[in-house]
Image: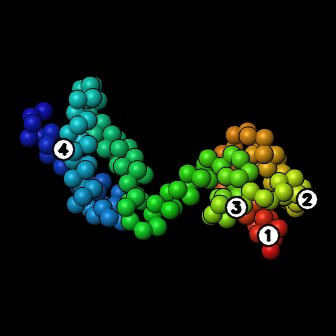
Amino acid sequence: MTEEQVVSTISLISSRLASKYTFPNYEEDDIQQEAFIIGMEALDRYDGVRPLENFLSIHIKNRLKNFKRDHYYRQDEGKAEEIQQGKKKLLDAASLDDMKAFIFHKEVSADLEERELLEYIDVHIPANMRSDYLRFKNDQVLTKTKKLHLLTCLREILGKFYA
């Protein structure tokens, strides 16, 4: 395959995929340019065994998914940084203080009697959430989805506790 055909193939794939991966702050032209760069960089990894178009389509598609995931929120604009920090707190919330901070989106004073709070949660946690709560309380791993559901439930329970 000549260089011209390779560039043409990358351009075709880039233009085909660009509209599927646009998001705020990145228009179709921006994504098409990123896809073209990704395709050019991928040529070093091409083994020549499979068809070039298939290899590039899969490679560019996967890299564009990563690009969109990594760049969807712009750290320097408004609430985006706060949203990202909230996500990090959700995934990292392991201690009771971290959990309270995540639930209330602020630091909670340390003078709260933890035993009283934990007893309140134990009484009011729904039966279907109890095993996840106990795993969370004992620093065991929970999936992101289960942790999100648990923290949402705990936010409701603690909202009533502080009311």
**Disc on the earlier residue, 1 or 3:** 3
Judge the density around disc 4: few (<14), some (14-19), many (≥20) Cα neighbours within 10 Å: some
**Disc on the earlier residue, 2 or 4:** 4
Asked whether, in this view, residue 69 is left or right of residue 161, the answer is: left
Where residue 111 sits: x, y (%)?
78, 59
- Give yes or no for contact between labels 4 and 1 (Cβ–Cβ under 8 Å): no
Circle 1: element type: helix
List the residue tagged with mark 2. Answer: 123
| Distance from Cα at disc 2 to Cα at disc 4 | 63 Å
List the residue tagged with mark 4. Answer: 9
Circle 3: element type: loop
Q: Nearest to the eye among marks 1 and 3: give it.
A: 3
List the residue tagged with mark 1. Answer: 162
Asked whether, in this view, residue 157 is left or right of residue 143, the answer is: right
The amino acid at mark 3 is Val
Closest to the observer: 115 or 53?
115
**Disc on the earlier residue, 2 or 3:** 3
**Disc on the earlier residue, 4 or 3:** 4
| Distance from Cα at disc 4 to Cα at disc 1 | 61 Å
List the residue tagged with mark 3. Answer: 108
**Disc on the earlier residue, 2 or 1:** 2
The amino acid at mark 4 is Thr
Q: Which residue is rendered at x = 80% and y = 65% of the image?
A: 157
Q: Nearest to the eye among marks 2 and 1: give it.
A: 1
**Residue 93 appears in the figure:** yes
| Distance from Cα at disc 4 to Cα at disc 3 | 57 Å
Closest to the observer: 17 or 80?
80
